[in-house]
Amino acid sequence: MILGAGPSGLAFAHSLLARGEESFVVLEKESEPGGLCRSVEVDGAPLDIGGGHFLDMRKREVLDLIFRFMPETEWNRFDRVAKIRLRGVEVDHPLEANLWQLPVESQADYLEAIAQAGCVHGQPVPEAFEDWVRWKFGERIAEEYMLPYNRKIWRIPLNQLGTYWLYKLPNVSFRETLMSCLQRRMYGALPAHGEFFYPKKHGYGEVWRRMGAALGDKLRLNTPIRSIRPQERLVNGEFKADIIVNTIPWPVWADADALPPAISAAVCSLVNVPIDVDYHPEMIPGKAHWLYEPDEKISYHRILVRSQFALGSRGYWTETNGNVAPPATGFRHRNAFAYPVNTIGKAAAVESIHEWARANSVLPLGRWGQWEHMNSDVAVASGIQAAQAALI
């Protein structure tokens, strides 16, 4: 039994089918599959209601699965253009690799701060998040971009965040940054979605809709989880399984009174961010697919310029922490579960939840089962790999 028909759940289900395993059912509370990757039509064109999601090009096994349902000929390929609004200009992301695009005086400000950063001088790695950011990037990037941007997204004191997940951020080399400014070119490797696919005629949700439709009666839509009895592996008093694959948020389990007290407490300690997606019909000049906005006087933290990737559309949407979003002025979709938050105690809490899950034949999977902020390609890859392991 698979709980949730998002990318990881759908990938797991189709990987089972590809290996001849058909004794499963997928339960999904919404009226269509896709999870955070669903799309709806707004103002005559698709809008991705879970925020900005794109198909990264780097995982061949993911593309092979996706293209079975939506062939490559139905996708446009893009070289990513992502910008950061800073000091009145727009700079390519990541900032530290593109300081050369700023005015010379600003380049000097940032270079001077990077030269004084703790990581450049081999100082010990700090444990507190804010201190770590300053140690890694220097005071200027920390104070003008990294810290305000993170305050906007998470809306919690930043030192409640752990530093165990920051290995994902690029190294900052004073010499490489200086050479980049002198040569006026980006240094380092492209980040995630450096190249990406987006459907030619649909929103990103179309491929997941097709994957769900291909499951036939193995996918049960409009089926929220009301009760779970994990020792019996019985869901809603109706669906019984040998193994439960969980891709839904763990708090849903707590709401269903399915967890022992210690595990329920661990689940209650997990933090997630709700995100409001708001559509605006105005056109934004430039070629950016999306823009990061660290200015704390502006409520949203990111703009997705729909017209740049959903070709033939107009307008853009913003993404804002739902706890502080201003009143909606047009179309809005609220995602109650959008970003899992890497708080200091998260790793220990998730490990205890997973240990209990494994002991009860429950397999955690995907963004919410693993409580990790993963892109859709990573979620699909995790579903493929988990299904392979389950059938060994």
Image: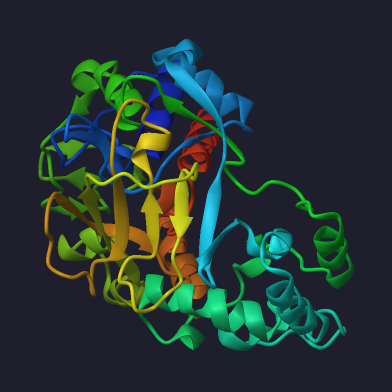
Quick check: 36 left or right of 104? left
- Color style of the picture: rainbow
Quarter of the rendering containing residue 132: bottom right
For the point 53% across and 61% down, which residue is it?
Answer: 84
- In this view, the residue in front, 317 or 135, is 317
187 up-or-down from 322: above or below = above
Q: Is residue 4 visible?
A: no
Q: Quadrant of the C terminus?
A: top right
Q: Position of residue 2 (x, y in %)?
A: 31, 37
The x and y percentages for residue 161 are 49, 79
Q: Residue at x 57, y 40 (%)?
A: 80
Residue 237 visible in the snapshot: yes
Q: Quarter of the image holding residue 334?
A: bottom left
Image position of 152 (left or right of 314): right
In this view of the protein, which residue sits in the foreground, 242 or 60? Answer: 60
Residue 125 placement: quadrant: bottom right
Residue 107: where, in percent of width, then height? 73, 72
